[in-house]
Image: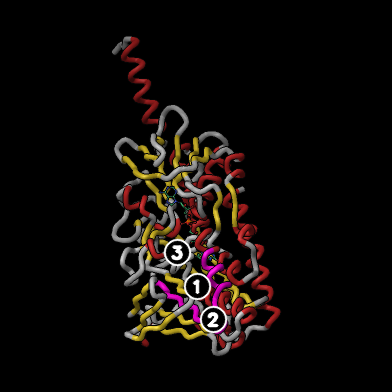
Amino acid sequence: MTLNRRQFIGTTAAMAAVLSAPMVKAQGTPRVVVVGGGAGGATAARYLAKDSKGAIDVTLIEPTRKYYTCFFSNLYLGGFKEIEDIGHTYGGLAAGGVNVVHDWAVGVDRDAKTVALAGGGSVPYDKLILSPGIDFVEGAVEGWGLSAQNAMPHAYKAGSQSELLKAQLMAMPEGGTFAMVAPPNPFRCPPGPYERVSMVAHFLKQNNPTAKIIVADPKPKFSKMSLFQEGWANHYEGMVDWIGEDFGGGNVSVDPGAMTVTIDGEETKVDVCNVIPAMKAGRIADLAGVTDGNWAPVNAADMSTKADADIYVLGDASSQGDMPKSGFSANSQAKVCANAVRGALTGSKVFPAKFSNTCWSLIAPDDGVKVGATYEATPEKIAKVDGFISKTGESADLRKATYEESEGWYTGITTDMLG
Ligand SMILES: Cc1cc2nc3c(=O)[nH]c(=O)nc-3n(C[C@H](O)[C@H](O)[C@H](O)COP(=O)(O)OP(=O)(O)OC[C@H]3O[C@@H](n4cnc5c(N)ncnc54)[C@H](O)[C@@H]3O)c2cc1C
């Protein structure tokens, strides 16, 4: 058979398309859009830009110009950090080749493969990575809504909320009451509320030693429970009253106008009320149609969603299996995802997925504890391989070393995320 010129060009183009599989795009520079510049999104954007060396166009969509880490925000409440110690800009990412767009993603058109921006216009993608963190479940705590977050802050997204809670803590009257409404599982940072109780107790012990802390908790137990309870007894004796599920800790309503908390029918007037409601994936995951219930189910090998092979969800927003919703987890998942996405788009080598996590908590000065594990990808989920946890009764030297380790981790992860 002889081919004329037109048939030859057509055939060659078709062959080129077949040969380029599994690359998603045969021509032009492939485009990855990342939504959310936190622990998951910033890491994924940075690694994609760094490792692809210009072979992939990476755009990060993030509304804030400064990312305040939730990690170490409790240490800010305790007086161990300044607010600026936990604020980080995106200049390093931009210098590293990421196109940083400061805007909200407000929609995803999965057919056209575009992300709509609040400021107008849209950004096209070949692969889309969502790492929007958490939003709150409406009506989760009776009497509380986002319009009440100034009276009763959550401080579960760091920045202005953390500063507000700190200001309220500092303004507490002598012998006043600090209440916390803790969230049900699963939620961002399992030890987070209890590290916060410790840091608030530390602040009050120094500045307002007759003040009290009440915790209303819908759960019967919590992360590192014996370690925290040992620490509260050692450092803050008689200050913390934890009311778990067995004692009606889940039967809670609040009145932000009257500043009251009602636990199992008993109303208490409080001075500060830190309401941490039930959580769900950041709203853009819902808008993209990749959630099932409150979270976005993903494939453990590459963090792609079950709903769309070209959309990946990282960090807190994902439903992935055994990993806790932590910054360390999100950063670890981001590296696996970036490697897989780069492989899919450029044909580069893809390594088997391996994940790890450690969550440190500070209980009192130089009294740090930790819990952690390693994980692997199975067809069903990210599955725990092995783990470790601090023990009660450890020496002061070991606890100090654990805290110092967490300081090193903080510097490491923020550099790893943002350059
Ligand atoms: C008090 C507290 C203490 C914690 N301590 C630790 C700790 O010690 N160690 C640890 O590992 N983890 C800790 N965490 C948990 C950690 O902060 C989160 O698990 C981690 O930040 C999750 O990363 P992410 O990428 O999923 O979300 P985030 O880091 O929250 O990032 C989400 C980003 O997406 C952006 N975004 C959301 N929606 C949109 C949209 N529509 N368009 C564009 N951008 C959007 C947000 O602005 C945000 O910057 C703590 C959390 C809290 C609350």
Residue type, label 1: Pro
Residue 277 seen in the current view: yes
Q: Is residue 70 above or below residue 310?
A: below
Residue 182 among those drawn in magenta: yes
Which quadrant is home to the N terminus? Answer: top left
**Mark 1 or 2 closer to N-term?**
1
Residue 24 seen in the current view: no
Q: Which residue is mark 1?
A: 191
Q: Which residue is mark 2?
A: 228
Residue at position x 45%, y 28% in the image? 28
Crowd around label 3: few <14 · some 14–19 · many ≥20 (10 Å): few
Residue type, label 3: Asn
Q: Secondary structure beneath disc 1?
A: loop
> Which label sits on residue 150?
3
Q: Secondary structure beneath disc 2?
A: helix
Labelled pair 1, 2 in contact (Cβ < 8 Å): yes
What segment is highlighted magenta in the picture? 164-184
Residue at position x 50%, y 62% in the image? 161
Report the side of 233 relative to 281 (left or right).
Answer: right
Residue at position x 55%, y 82% in the image? 227
Residue type, label 2: Phe
Report the side of 38 relative to 109 (left or right).
Answer: right
Residue at position x 53%, y 73% in the image? 196
Crowd around label 2: few <14 · some 14–19 · many ≥20 (10 Å): many
Residue 273 vs residue 75, the one in the foreground: 273
**Mark 2 or 3 closer to N-term?**
3
